[in-house]
Structure formats: structure tokens, C-alpha cells
């Protein structure tokens, strides 16, 4: 049927037509061997959009002649899962292979939904194939993950995209009847971003937009038809985490150009500006910290501005803050201090508060020496007096270790003046 999208018309139905992922389905590869043996265990396919996860699952079911059930994590709940499992049980006969249940976007399943699959996977009622764009280690419950192998699918390489482009032009029932000349493919491949489905969608868009007898495809035509770059950024998928990671690491690494680039990728891709602003606040505390305390003030102000102003104007404030943080001196001493202190507390338990630091709101507490001998620092020269603030058991413990930057060198000198031998 020609009213089907090009990507659907070209969906492979056998491994011979499947393009890419040679590390999984090439000669001698693990999935190829599994399919040829006829013995297939439950597994999860992890990879970005448009790399053939759903197609591969369908090919496996067809090749092995297994009953095949598809569930979408977006539209299915525990009820639908149980219905499929009950149907699988009803289809079971002696020596018949168990059905394959394919769950698209399995990372969107709740814990209870994933729990409902466990026993059926464990006792072999079903063979589970899950597809996800997210890291299964974070999104799939441990009991289910331990019962499944995880296979990683990669973005399509340029040679794979070229092969797919040629196949579309030569074999598709619609395109092969048109006179199409591909003069340049750089823009096609760049905008596709390793996503086979996106490549075919762009090709179809360009072809359908032309009324010429000979349809010329070059970089200029592609860019003109797309108008805006369909950025390879899925704010609900793996790219969301990859790009925010690149953004954070660019700011931390003091590269303002890279930081602004990744900021632009997120904004053009439709990321929620408040999400970015929150990350800037965290960066200001975690990575700039006491090397430039003003960074936190600016980041907090930026968050407030983004909330009040919104896009598109908020992009300017986000850019200003991003550049400021990227070009600021860096210190993670506050980050290290609280992590070390919390780990120490978990290890040592609840040490007693020294009596002189305790509050004494009642006469009984006063009689028990709560607050006795506490020295009020403001009564002393320089608003400081040397007294013990940590519990007796750990009175010499240190957590804050100033780093080498202008601001913390000043802090360190002040601490040495106050605490003498404690800070050397």
C-alpha cells in the first residue's frame, strides 16, 4: 500500500535485508547464532531511536515462527501484561515454543508492571524482548534485568545510511518510479543523525515536496525543505542524558564555546529551560563552589529569571550564566566535604553532642550542664575563640579541605590564623 510511510514500506522482514548492527547480527555474532540455533532467551535491546530495535524483534519472531505479542509501555498497564501472559499460557502445548512478548519503551514500565513480568519470564511462559532508549541499569528492576541479556544497538553509520538510501531509491514501489538524482547526501546524513527512520522521513519529505519531473536532491534542497534543522535531540530519551552530560562536563571543563553549543542543542531541541537552569544551580555549587561564591548567586538569579520570563528571552540569561560558570575558577571542595562528612556519619553513627554546645531550655537541662562553658565568639577579639565544636570522639576530624584558587587561599589563611595547628 503506497499510503504507508516510506520507513514502514522499507521495514526489513529478514536478517538478509536488515542493515547495520553487524556486531549483533553479522556472521558469527551472538544474536545471529542464537537465531540460527532456534534457542532464544529473554533480552533487552538498548539503543537510540531509529536503529532497528522493533524491526529486529519482529524478524526474530518471524524467523523462529513464534507467536508474537507487542505491548507499548506508553499504552499498556499491569492488566494488559497479565492478559498477554494468560494468552501465552493458553497457547502452550507440549513441545511448542513459547511466545515472544515484545515491550517497546520498557523503561517507561513502572515497577509493578515490570514485576508482573517476572514469573512468566522466569518459568519460560514467555520469551521477553524489551526495547529501550534508556540505560537498563537505571530503568529496569534488578530481578528482571538479571533474567535478561542486554544488547546494545549503535547509531547507524554513514555506510549503513548510504546503503539504506540506495535501497530506498532502487526498491521502493513509489520511489523507483520517479526520476530522482542524489547529487549530495551530506545534509541528509547529518540531519538523520544515525537514525534510519529519520533519514527515510527526510527523503520522503524532500521527494514529496518536489513537482519537478526530475527530482534533484542536494544539500541546499534538503536544508531548504527542512527549514529548521531537526536536531538529533530526544528530550525524553537517551539524547536527553547524553547532551546534558556533555553540557555539564563542558562547563566543568571551562570550555565556554562547547558549553554554549550544547546549551543551543538543548534549546533548539525543545528542552525545558527550567531543567537547564536547575543544572546550572547545581553546577555552581558542585563545580565552582567556594572558588567563586558569586556563581551560585548568578545561577539562582538565572533560575528565577527563566521562571519569570520564559522563552525566547530566557535563552540570553541561560547563555550569560553558562559562560560565566564555564569561565569561573573551579573548586569542588564543598562537594567533597559534604560527601566525606555524610560517609563518615554513616560509618561512625551518632556521636554525642558536647555538653557546652547543647541547648538548655529547661532548668533540668541547665542542672545537667547543658550549655555550660559555651563561649560566645562575639565576646572575643575578632569574633573568634578557640573551642571544640565536634564530638569528643572525632574532635580533630577534618572534612573541608581548601583547594588552590584565589578565593580559597584567602579562606585557608584565615582558618590557619584562627585554628593554628588544625589547618597546616
Image (tube, grey):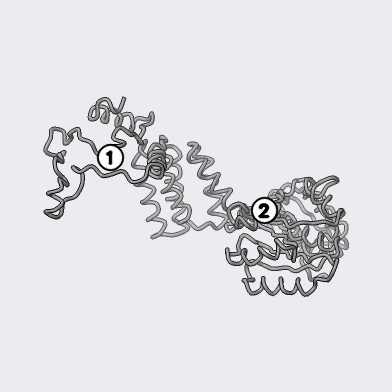
Q: Which mark is residue 90?
A: none
- Which of pointers 2 and 1 indicates the residue nearer the eye? 1
Q: Secondary structure at mark 2?
A: loop
Residue at 71% in and 72% down: 84
> What is the CA distance from the residue labelled 2 to the residue labelled 1?
52 Å
Res. 183 visible in picture: no
Q: Quadrant of the C terminus?
A: top left
Q: Position of residue 271 (x, y in %)?
A: 53, 56
Q: Nearer the viewer, residue 81 or 238?
A: 81
Q: Quadrant of the N terminus?
A: bottom right
Residue at 83% in and 71% down: 93
Mark 1 crowd level (few <14, some 14–19, many ≥20, 10 Å Cα): some
Q: With 279 as the anchor, is 71 left or right in this view? A: right
Look at mark 1 in the image and give the residue it sits on.
391
Q: Position of residue 327 (x, y in %)?
A: 44, 37
Look at mark 2 in the image and give the residue it sits on.
48
Residue at 82% in and 56% down: 39
Amino acid at each position: 500500500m503506497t499510503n504507508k510511510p516510506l520507513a514502514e514500506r522499507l521495514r526489513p522482514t529478514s536478517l538478509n535485508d536488515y542493515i547495520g548492527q553487524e556486531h549483533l547480527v553479522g556472521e558469527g555474532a551472538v544474536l545471529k547464532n542464537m537465531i540460527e540455533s532456534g534457542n532464544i532467551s529473554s533480552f533487552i535491546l538498548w539503543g537510540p531511536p531509529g536503529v532497528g530495535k522493533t524491526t529486529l524483534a519482529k524478524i526474530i519472531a518471524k524467523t523462529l515462527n513464534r507467536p508474537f505479542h507487542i505491548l507499548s509501555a506508553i499504552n499498556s498497564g499491569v492488566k494488559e501484561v497479565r492478559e498477554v501472559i494468560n494468552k501465552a499460557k493458553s497457547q502452550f502445548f507440549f513441545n511448542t515454543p513459547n511466545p515472544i512478548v515484545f515491550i517497546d519503551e520498557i523503561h517507561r514500565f513502572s515497577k509493578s508492571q515490570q514485576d508482573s513480568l517476572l514469573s512468566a519470564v522466569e518459568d519460560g511462559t514467555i520469551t521477553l524482548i524489551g526495547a529501550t532508549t534508556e540505560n537498563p541499569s537505571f530503568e529496569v528492576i534488578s530481578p528482571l534485568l538479571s533474567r535478561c541479556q542486554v544488547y546494545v544497538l549503535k547509531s547507524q553509520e554513514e555506510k549503513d545510511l548510504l546503503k539504506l538510501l540506495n535501497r530506498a531509491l532502487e526498491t521502493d514501489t513509489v520511489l523507483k518510479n520517479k526520476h530522482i538524482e542524489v547529487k549530495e547526501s551530506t545534509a541528509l546524513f547529518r540531519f538523520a543523525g544515525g537514525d534510519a527512520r529519520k533519514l527515510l522521513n527526510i527523503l520522503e519529505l524532500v521527494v514529496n515536496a518536489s513537482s519537478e519531473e526530475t527530482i534533484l536532491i542536494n544539500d541546499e534542497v534538503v536544508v531548504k525543505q527542512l527549514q529548521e534543522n531537526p536536531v538529533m535531540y530526544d528530550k525524553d530519551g537517551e539524547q536527553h542524558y547524553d547532551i546534558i552530560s556533555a553540557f555539564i562536563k563542558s562547563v566543568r571543563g571551562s570550555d565556554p564555546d562547547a558549553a554554549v553549543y550544547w546549551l543551543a542543542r538543548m534549546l533548539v531541541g525543545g528542552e525545558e529551560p527550567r531543567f537547564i537552569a536547575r543544572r546550572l544551580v547545581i553546577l555552581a555549587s558542585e563545580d565552582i563552589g567556594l572558588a567563586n561564591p558569586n556563581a551560585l548567586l548568578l545561577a539562582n538569579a538565572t533560575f528565577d529569571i527563566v521562571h519569570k520570563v520564559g522563552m525566547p528571552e530566557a535563552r540570553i540569561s541561560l547563555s550569560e550564566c553558562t559562560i560565566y560558570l564555564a569561565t569561573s575558577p573551579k573548586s569542588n571542595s564543598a562537594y567533597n566535604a559534604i560527601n566525606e562528612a555524610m560517609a563518615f556519619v554513616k560509618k561512625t553513627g551518632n556521636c554525642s553532642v558536647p555538653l557546652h554546645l547543647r541547648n538548655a531550655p529547661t532548668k533540668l537541662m541547665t542542672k545537667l550542664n547543658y550549655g555550660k562553658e559555651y563561649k560566645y565568639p562575639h565576646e572575643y577579639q575578632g569574633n573568634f575563640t578557640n573551642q571544640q565544636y565536634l564530638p569528643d570522639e572525632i574532635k580533630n576530624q577534618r572534612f573541608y579541605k581548601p583547594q588552590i584558587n584565589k578565593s580559597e587561599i584567602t579562606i585557608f589563611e584565615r582558618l590557619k590564623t584562627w585554628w593554628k595547628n588544625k589547618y597546616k
